[in-house]
Amino acid sequence: MSFEFLAPDAASAFSGAAPAARSPIEWAQRDAGAQFTERAGWRVVADYGELAKEATACRETVGVADRSHLGKVELQGDPGVVAAAVSQLARGAALQLGTATLVDEVWWCPITAGRVLAITPPEATGQLRAELEAAVSEGPFASVVELTAALGSNAVVGPQARETFARVCALDMRPDRFLEGAFAPVSVARTPGMILRERGDQFLHLFGSGYAQYNWTVFVDAAESLGGRAVGDETLRAGKREAAARA
Amino acid sequence: MSERLPPNPRERINRARTINFSFDGKDVEAYDGDTIGSALHASGQKVLSRSFKYHRPRGLLCCAGQCPNCLVDVDGSPGVRACTEPVRAGIKVTHMNAKPSLDFDVMRATDLFGKPFTPPGFYYKTFIRPRRLWPLYEKVLRNAAGLGRLAKRQADREWRTEYRRRRADVLVVGGGVAGMAAALRAAELGADVVLMDDGPELGGAMLAGQDADSAKELAESIRAAGVEVLAPAAALGFFDGLVPAWQGNTLHQVRADRHIAATGSIEQPLIFDGNDLPGVMLCSGAERLASLYGVRPGETAVVATTTDRGLESALALQEAGIEVAGVVDARAGDGSEELLGALAAAGISVHRGTGVVKAFGRKHVRGVVVADLDDEGRPDPASKRGIDCDLVAVSGGTMPATSLLLQAGAKARWDEASGSYLPDGVPSDIRVAGAVAGHEPRNCAAKSGAVAGAEAALSLGLGSEEDRARLQADRASLLRETEGPAPAGQARTQDAGSRNGKCFACLCEDVTTKDIDYAIEEGFDSLELLKRYTTVTMGPCQGRMCQLASIRQMSEDTGASIEEVGLTTARPPWSTVPMGVLAGRPFEPAKRSAVHGRHRELGGNVMWAGDWRRAYDYGDVRAETMAVHEGAGLIDVSTLGKLVVSGPEAGAFLNLLYPNRFDNLKPGRIRYGVLGDDAGRITDDGTICRLDENSFYVTTTSSGADAVESWFSWWLAEWKLDVQLTDVSQGLSAFNLAGPRSREILSGLTELDCSNDSFAYLDGKRANVVGVPCLMLRIGFVGELGYELHCPGPLAEHLWDSLLEAGAAHEIRPFGLEPQRILRLQKMHILVGQDTDAESNPLEAAMPWIVKFEKEEDFIGRWALEAVAERGAENKLIGFTIENGTVPTEGAAVVVDGQPVGLVTSSRFSPKLERSIGMAWVPAALAEDGTTITVSDEGRQISAAVQTAPFYDPDQELLRG
Ligand code: FES
């Protein structure tokens, strides 16, 4: 791996345990009373001390959860090379602009024909990066760059999620227009961003991590004005389990 | 509540529930459902405002939010329309634009005595001389002008506002019968429909009449059909398919694939002497007041009209319990026989071929003078007679509300038959329905709406063949219904003011018919000029009440036909809207470093630096500066732009972009680069580290990151090289550990050999520091031994904390932007944008060594730089010192014989060197060591000595050591 200085998971032990990675929003979360837990080398907000209210927000209004710990790796190169590598790793998936594909818990998000962002659970980031590098190690040049740290991300979940985005973004997110898996690079709250509809009323918003605290403040403020709130990872996981059970 | 009528089934008020509020400090009792205007009128408060220019008393006119007459201040928010604003318990309502009171306004003197001083455009003609008094005039005029006052304190002016974006298949503007029918039909065919209306309740004109129940049923149907109803939400304009609408604290921004304008029509006032007196109301306004709020608009009414609308209104008012003393109908012969019969049966006398010449009364109407009209509408003085009344209900016909359509690109054509401007040339994605399309009667309006709704939905590919067939049939029947005879009667104005009287063409701006005559006489004889000169149509009503009147008068005065006079387009916003709503939430996108919280904890003075929030200092600039010289300092430079440029042709790519070479840079080595444009002008700078054979790590200035990324991407697309570019600026934190003890500190935190032999100046190494993966660049922007550590943001806090902790024994201090600026100035390291401007090139900016003309390949700006090299430098960037400690202002002029020849770009006092230092652009002839230059700074003449080598460590011994 050429660019290990870009990868939070390249941390090592030095007179003690390896340092934990922190979200770019951690300062704001601490102020909001977050309880942290460690997950795949990251300090992740488990909850804000009000699990029941957090679950209600996601079910009835809207919850905003920090997911900056998701792994993000960019593959860039000749469109043919990129398509072949994605197909190899994503069990034959063919990418189409505007739509992300979920394979084995990795979202393959095409930004342009020659540029794909892969989003993965944090524990699998290193493996995905290695697989991508291996997939393009032969043949024409393609670059694999770890963007986990460069991109912050929030999940926006609940029946008022679209209304929350409507406060800050002009993307047409009507359910029959922005289908599950839809992916769009778009301006959000006057900053460059990307939106992925993961499922139902759950959206992932990606943004430059320098703007993480700003975006967090804007989204939590908008959510609160709609009766929603900040929620922790526990609530999201519970929601995911429920969705899986329903499926 | 003395002026309430008996209950009626259409009223909106709940008489069982009273609410109290105050008006000008007096307690007012209202019913739940009242508007401020209806409650005030019911309480006997008939004067609600004073007019803009003459401060004449004004009362309710339209009762529909269309005119300027009822603007009040509610809880500190000025410009609220009392006639549509619902009453809330405890609100404090006050009048605007009157001093000392609404009842007695001293500025009324402008009405009584100010005539010679206030002709149209008086502000262009008077108060001009003597010129030196203009600041005083301006103050007085500004004080006198305007409506209402904002709260003084910022905190009292702030309120939460939102933008809300909504995409839709079909947007219907207007919630009258046509709009509702359109929305319903489009939704039935499967369209996602939004309907917006400025009233609190859908139904438009139906609500105050016999069809109120059908309006309510229709409103329920459209909600049941899934139409999103925004009400009250006033559409503000049409911007390339985007229609903003104000609702409460929200600015909806609706973008639809199809639009339906069902904006209705606006009843027009009549023009006569005293037509602005409280008690003169539009027929529709009087009816709304009586019907919706159970408020008696007056005891005895005279109805003045030019159409059948007035005849209907007279019957409605009498039915509501108001005595109608007579109908004054400007038409001698036209008029519905049926209505005339009904009026006769009701005992209401109709004065045909007659007009109101004057309404009289001091603060309220006490009666009218009427006169017979000749064939051209002129009153016969011999026939003048008076009728006592306290209400003059007027109807001068209607004007289709075409403004939004005109903003959307439609045209308006004068339709002689209906006596109004109808939309024409409407863009293909817009449909027009109801009164605005000339389809006025209720059934016809509903059909018109259904046709528009079906057309909109079908054009989006929705619906079936059957639906298409039904549309054809509906179109045909609509055509039959709208064919028939033209509406009886043409709207005509009656301009018969006495010598001293005032007939208002424009109530908002107090423009009288005489003002218009005067302006036309002065040569402002096109409608556009007239508008700008007299400001007619430019007030809060945006022409709703005055456009047709001014067009007609211009036509009469100039002899041009109404069609020739034409129409002006009202600019957005079409409805009054608070500025705060337009501004929306005050987003202030700010980038923050991963350790931003630490800077705050350490007492950093955080300020803006480009898009970033940065620590300017930590409270002691001198100590921070000296720590870097004497021990160690740590600065957060995460704001730097950072690009990964990779690919087999990455070196060649950089060679083309920069004036120096990069393909020969060895992996693990660093080189400085100055980026220029085609004209050779400096646009950015930074360091470039070669990571491996194919990859380079490029840093840029903090504010230049986005521009450099765009510049690289643009050229990459142009040159089609096998290179990939990724911006990692926000993912990597970067800290500069600098100072003579920095090596010692670093050595204790990493297994890397940090000795000078193994980690030399301009080396780039990759290693973990306290377990954090880092790219370490040995560079020295601040002029001391230093290391820039670039690491993933999520691990940055650990690295920052560890460096400060380990450095404590070496007297490390965090240092901010200001100490960094002093330190870099000592080294004469330029700041792009501060020491350079849009004309600076590296040859003149003291960096000729960076331009490698010997490179065989072309590079951006080569041709321009060669030209500079050939002609020789005209100006040069030099350093200067001032022994007496004076620090000239940045931007101060360098002068020769009193004439400016250059300017100071940077200047500071250096605590290390104990003298003032700076950089300046000077003519090349002065750019010699030891030359004395003169800086002219706010009246001071300061002598400075030129120095071309860095002030500190000119031989780089410390940097390389
Ligand atoms: S009376 Fe309120 S706007 Fe006309």
Image (cartoon, coloured by chain):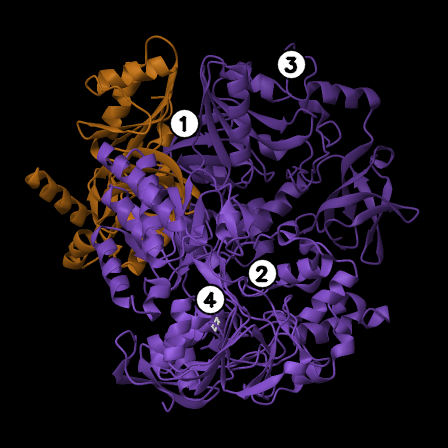
- Amino acid type at circle 3 is Asp
Q: Earlier in the sequence, mark 1 or mark 4?
A: 4
Identity of the residue drawn at 71% across and 69% down: B515
User: Label 4, on which residue?
Assistant: B335
Identity of the residue drawn at 62% across and 74% down: B52
User: Which numbered mark, 4 or 2, is in the foreground of this view?
Assistant: 4
Q: Chain of mark 2?
A: B
Position of B901 with respect to B644 (left or right) is: right
SS at circle 3:
loop
Identity of the residue drawn at 9% across and 38% down: A244
Q: Earlier in the sequence, mark 3 or mark 1?
A: 1
Q: Quadrant of residue B308?
A: bottom left
Q: Earlier in the sequence, mark 4 or mark 2?
A: 4
Whether discs 1 and 4 lie on one chain: the answer is: yes
Q: Do the residues bearing badges 1 and 4 touch, measured as CB atoms within 8 Å?
A: no
Which mark, residue B570? none
User: Label 3, on which residue?
Assistant: B858
Which mark, residue B548? 2
Q: Colour of chain A?
A: orange
Residue count near mark 4 (Cα–Cα under 10 Å), binned few <14, some 14–19, many ≥20:
some
User: Which numbered mark, 1 or 4, is in the foreground of this view?
Assistant: 4
- Amino acid type at circle 2 is Leu
- The residue nearer to you, when weighing B358 against B868, is B358
